[in-house]
Image (cartoon, rainbow, N blue to C red):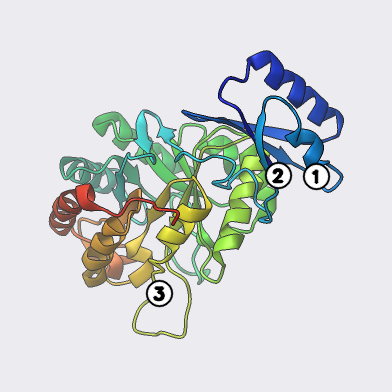
Amino acid sequence: MIVVLKPNTKQEQLDHLKDWLHSLNIDTHISVGENHTIVGLVGDTSSIDMDLISALDIVETVKRIQEPFKNANRKFHETDAVVDVSGVKIGGGHFQIIAGPCSVESREQVTYIAQRVKESGAGMLRGGAFKPRTSPYSFQGLHDEGIKLLLEAKKQTGLPIVSEIMNSEHIPLFEDVDLVQVGARNMQNFELLKELGKTRKPILLKRGLANTIDELLMSAEYIMAGGNENVILCERGIRTFETRTRNTLDLSAIPVLKKLTHLPIVIDPSHAGGYAYLVKPMALAATAAGADGLMIEVHNDPAKALCDGPQSLTPEAFDEVANLVFQIRPYACKYDEK
């Protein structure tokens, strides 16, 4: 249920309304917009009398909502959220490219790539320290040493770093990581999501390869229900019957998510297609469709990469893609709820 208050509502009146709702074991989520203040009611609202609330002097309208995700719902928060990642903003008109190697392999490798992607316009550096792999015999990452190397690259370039967390026991290791990524395989690791909800770290939440959009939003809800509203969604392709691509990039997820949620949306064309030649057209299409950002894998020598070499761009190829993306960005689709 959401309650839209009249523009002239005083803070004291709002506080009285909140206290009354809390006495009924209903949590409240307050969103202050340019013209209205919206009070989101979170909890079992079945016994709440809508007519009683509607009769209050400060209330303009009351609506029940059917979606189970409340905090992530655009109805609770009409304006686009802006997530601040150590000074780099994304969402609400702020567009960013996150770029870097699939996995951190060496100091020289990650530092060189960080410098090159920054020169091309990337706003954040990605790099896997912990790597979930299908085969237990594949390279699993450098773990805490990988994070140290990312921090060294950050010190040299100033780029905030993005890296994937595997379980809640690793949270202390991510204290200095600017944007914590929850990978597709962990999208429904609810215990991890609940622990991340207790932090205030920005979280990049990837859609699972076989999960629906509603399931993605419910996973975001787990994080936000814990009090952490700094969530960025990431569409990275879903598994279909098609075998010519690694996954199928769901570009329609962009307008659908824009309609349903205020959270920023990033597209990962590298994991979606699985091949470098697909990255440029998919990145351009996602930008034109209104994505708030892109996540692109870049490697100085893809043929020798320890992880996901076939989908990685060279720094030169990334520079070309970034230039085209920034040309398209001013003409990208804007959210239209109609």
Lower position in the chain sequence, tag 1 or tag 2: 2
Q: Secondary structure at mark 1?
A: loop
Q: Residues within 10 Å of mark 2 (few under 14, many from 20)?
A: many
User: Looking at this view, is 283 or 338 the one in front?
Assistant: 338
Inter-mark Cα distance, 3 to 1: 39 Å
Q: Secondary structure at mark 3?
A: loop
Task: Look at label 1 and name its amino acid.
Answer: Thr
Q: Residues within 10 Å of mark 3 (few under 14, many from 20)?
A: many
Q: Which mark is residue 45?
A: 1
Residue at image coords 33%, 51%: 334
Inter-mark Cα distance, 3 to 2: 35 Å
Lower position in the chain sequence, tag 3 or tag 1: 1
Q: Position of residue 213 (x, y in %)?
A: 54, 63
Residue at image coords 25%, 31%: 156
Q: Are marks 1 and 2 in contact (CB under 8 Å)?
A: yes
Q: Which residue is mark 2?
A: 1
Q: Position of residue 184 (x, y in %)?
A: 52, 61
Q: Secondary structure at mark 2?
A: loop
Residue at image coords 60%, 27%: 6
> Looking at the rendering, which quadrant does residue 178 occupy?
top left
